Image: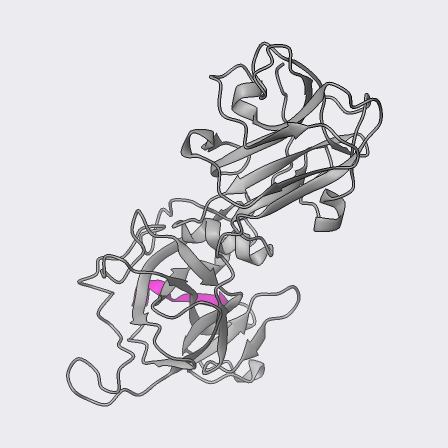
Amino acid sequence: MRVVLVVPSLLLACSTATDTGGPDTAQPADTADTADTADTADTSETGDPLTPNLGFVLDGEWSGATLTLTWLDMSSLGSEALLVGDVLLSADADATPLLVEAPDVPVGDLFEIDPINLPGTLVAAYIPALHVDTDGDGVISADETFLGTTNTMAVFVSGVEPTSMGLGLGWTAMVLAEGDPLFVDPMTIPLSTNLLPDNEAHLGGTFKGETDGRRLALVSVMELNGGRPLDDLWGGELQSPWQIDLTEAPPSNHVTDLGFLGSDGALELVVDYQDLDGDGGYSTGDVPEYGACQGTDPVGLLWVPGSGDLAFAFSMAMQGLTPGWLAVNMGDAGGLMTNEEAAALVIDDGCVY
């Protein structure tokens, strides 16, 4: 059985790209240049008292994490390629509110926000994010993933003071939202651990027909498309109503490059089949009958790992997505499904892959 996937783009609104000018994009900063620019202790590295100019209200399992501020090319917002650059600040997340003293902003990070209405007003924007810095280098590393980020950017204003916007020069915070910019208190920027993986998944529904002798399995799309046999993530006798529950991430051999996702991941499909070889699981010698559908659209379970790519992680957070298992409608106009929708699927002769 070969599965032809039609999966709507879920996460491609913000993907890392390479900039052609200005700061290096999507590359961690050299820790000698950037990671030592701030400290959350009472004194700076020179022994002088800190003068906090940014504050973060942390929520979730943040203890022991590291806060970073990474340059964002605001002109790339809304495009298919979100551009990010060097880390301006790295600090231990050891309290909430977390008060830090951001260093001077590099000239190359500044750009003229509105040459027509605000000539000479320059801004630089930075994405706050949290990760567990296991190697202690102050920036995200290959084996580290982001725990959380926010739609409230730390923004530095320079040049001509934008009095028409009610802003002064120096640090402020801006909420990324539709409509006019919303500026808020830079000492109370909210930041939660909204990117912790959720490895629980639940699918359920009904079967129209006789269940005798039939089985149900959750099978990797790689195997269904003629790849090597892989262990089913779930299997059992077909009943009506039926339910599939997962509580763990998939094995590594289920994870592959998913082009539509812009990342590695796993895609698993519900298969109703006749167990002809009697081995108790789905195999190439068995006869698959139907899948699980929402209406007539096939449904799958997509597993998205935590990411160390800030553009990808930021995109997920801005769409309200969490790494881990996601139930997806794979029809032409499909997308993410609610828990209620994922529990009301149907298996019948109108649902085939």
Query: Could you tell me which quadrant the C terminus lies in?
Result: top right
Image quadrant occupied by the N terminus: top right
Residue at 47% x, 63% y: name it.
149
Give the image location of residue 217, x and y in percent: 63, 27
Q: Tell me if 346 is positioned left or right of 178 in this view.
A: right
Residue 66's place in the image compared with 303, above or below, is: below
Residue found at the very far bottom of the displayed protein: 49
User: How many callouts does the rendering have?
Assistant: 0
Does the magenta segment cover residue 295? no
For the record, the magenta segment spans 106-114
**Percent x, y of residue 109:** 35, 64
Q: Is residue 10 visible?
A: no
Near-viewer residue (75 or 71): 71
- Is residue 70 shown left or right of residue 163? left
Magenta span contains residue 109: yes
View extreme (left): residue: 46
Up the image or down, 298 lies above or below 308; here it is: above
- Residue 180 seen in the current view: yes
195 relative to 3 in the view: left or right? left
Q: Residue at x 48, y 57 (%)?
A: 196
**Whole-percent x and y of residue 49?**
24, 90
Which residue is nearer to you in this view: 298 or 158?
A: 298
Q: Is residue 304 left or right of residue 143?
A: right
The colour scheme applied to this rendered structure is one colour
Residue depicted at x 68% and y 41%: 203
Q: Residue at x 70, y 45 (%)?
A: 337
Place of residue 326 in the rendered image (x, y in percent of width and height, measured from the top left): 60, 44
